[in-house]
Amino acid sequence: MSLASVWLQLHDGSLVRADQATEITVHPTPALSGKPAHWLLTVSVPVSVGSGDRGGWRTEQLHRTLAQTSTPPTDAPLALARLLARLDAADASGVVHADTSHVRHLPHPDHTLGAGEVRLGFTAFAGAEPGTALDGVVTPDDPEELAEDRSRRAALAGSGAGPR
């Protein structure tokens, strides 16, 4: 079992593979003139980034933002760790997302966890149950999917696009 098939959706919409996250943190951004401070729920990935100033060159882990809130989401790191542990035990595959826009709306569906200002959810990949056989790229559950895929491939082949 591993989290190699679970992805974390970041605040900007990009994805990070969950098994690459080494740390879950909550920290504030600095307040800038005319802009209040925010709290960030982040994961660290094992890539060092550097920046320099008059004091020299500093390196640190790369932090990727999952959610941004106006108040500290203190429960979110533990809730995310618990969710990832459950997904790992279930050998799940899909996307974990953090939502701050609908947190006050109850009840939470079974596939989400409330964590203060952040609601963590999981969306499984369709047809990605453990043990699903793959033939080439995909094995469709519906014969119509296969027909659509064949016609799409034929159109790509006729357009000159795609591998030759």
Image: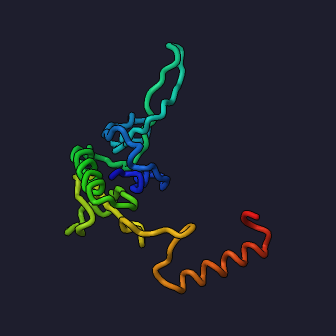
At 33% from the left and 38% from the top, the residue drawn is: 23
At 25% from the left and 56% from the top, the residue drawn is: 86
Relative side of 40 to 46, left or right = left
At 20% from the left and 69% from the top, the residue drawn is: 107
Vertical order, 163 against 77 (above or below): below
Colour scheme: rainbow
Task: In this rendered view, identify the residue nearer to me: 7 or 41.
Answer: 7
Task: In this rendered view, identify the residue nearer to me: 72 or 66.
Answer: 66
Query: How many numbered marks have been drawn onto this rendered protein structure?
Result: 0
Q: Position of residue 120 (x, y in %)?
A: 30, 57
| Picture quadrant of residue 25 | top left
Task: In this rendered view, identify the residue nearer to me: 50 or 17.
Answer: 17
Vertical order, 27 against 73 (above or below): above
Furthest toward the bottom, the residue is 144
Relative side of 149 to 110, left or right = right
Q: Position of residue 90 (x, y in %)?
A: 28, 60
| Picture quadrant of residue 136 | bottom right
In which quadrant will I find the C terminus?
bottom right
Q: Position of residue 115 (x, y in %)?
A: 23, 53
Furthest toward the top, the residue is 55
